[in-house]
Image (cartoon, rainbow, N blue to C red):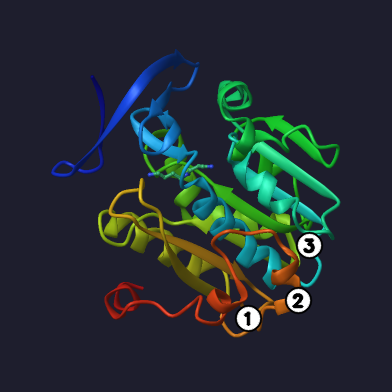
Amino acid sequence: MIWFTEYQTENVALNIRAKEVKRIKSKYQEIIVLDSYEFGKMLVLDGLIQTTEKDEFIYHEMLSHPAMLLHPEPKKVLVIGGGDGGTVREVLKHPSVEQVHLCEIDEEVIIVSEKYFPSISEKLRDPKVKIFIEDGNAFLDEKENYYDVIILDSSDPVGASEILFQENFYKKVKKSLKENGILAAQTESPILQEEHFKNAVSNIKKVFRNVGVYLAFIPTYPSGMWSFTVASDLIDVKNKKIDEERINKLKTKYFSDKLSHCLFSLPKFVEEMI
Ligand code: SPD
């Protein structure tokens, strides 16, 4: 019997029973592909669960669609991280999109995802998609006033990803966005990663005029309660009404027009943190 344990904090761990485990060592990290009983295939980077066949749609839809729909007509989109391709797949559901750049530092994540997670990575070779195997922070140095939406599909703020949660990085994101551009970022769990969550949101608030935080329930992420943040200088993200017709044309399983009405209504204790 194989049990995989994710150590989420010093005091909390999640156990998942698996049929098979494959370990791949890349230049940057240990990549594990688990075939689990409950969640289907799972992608784990340096011991931390990134995505599972059963619940990936929640994370990828909620990271992508609010920002994409808050923008009047997103054409050029950048995804930083997200080598599994789930975010790219969701972004391409928006008919206005002409170009998606995916900047992933670890090519092996893309190779593994295309081999073991075809339903997640299925759109990575779409003609609108261009893949850059580069460090996201350095990649943005070359870009100015270019993207309509930038999506930070990063792993947790430890090691190489730490920089992607800092004020200076968000300043580069802002420089690379057009004037009415929108940032979307995964910003960790308010319950089990309170400091990471508060730091990310407070750094984003130092850089962008309009910031909105929302939550989704993701069973395989620490505590299940996961946060996302959207931000823009020109677009009043929290008060702009999302066009229901655009939502209803998307094929989604989690995000919906009803959900969009109360997207930014946070539980009181989370509101108080930010
Ligand atoms: N603790 C897990 C956080 C992972 C966030 N990124 C997931 C990438 C999936 N595309």
Amino acid type, callout 2: Glu
| Residue 239 placement (x, y as % from top left) | 59, 85
The CA span between labels 2 and 1 is: 20 Å
Residue visible at 31% across and 62% down? Answer: 190
Q: Which residue is mark 3?
A: 74
Amino acid type, callout 1: Asp
Residue 251 as seen in the image, left or right of residue 207: right
Which badge, 1 or 3, is on the more N-terminal residue? 3
Q: Which residue is mark 1?
A: 236
Residue visible at 27% across and 76% down? Answer: 269
Residues marked 3 and 2 touching at CB (< 8 Å): no
At mark 1, the secondary structure is loop
Q: Which residue is mark 2?
A: 245
Q: Is residue 71 visible?
A: no
Residue 146 as seen in the image, left or right of residue 2: right
Of badges 3 and 2, the one in the foreground is: 2
Residues marked 1 and 3 touching at CB (< 8 Å): no
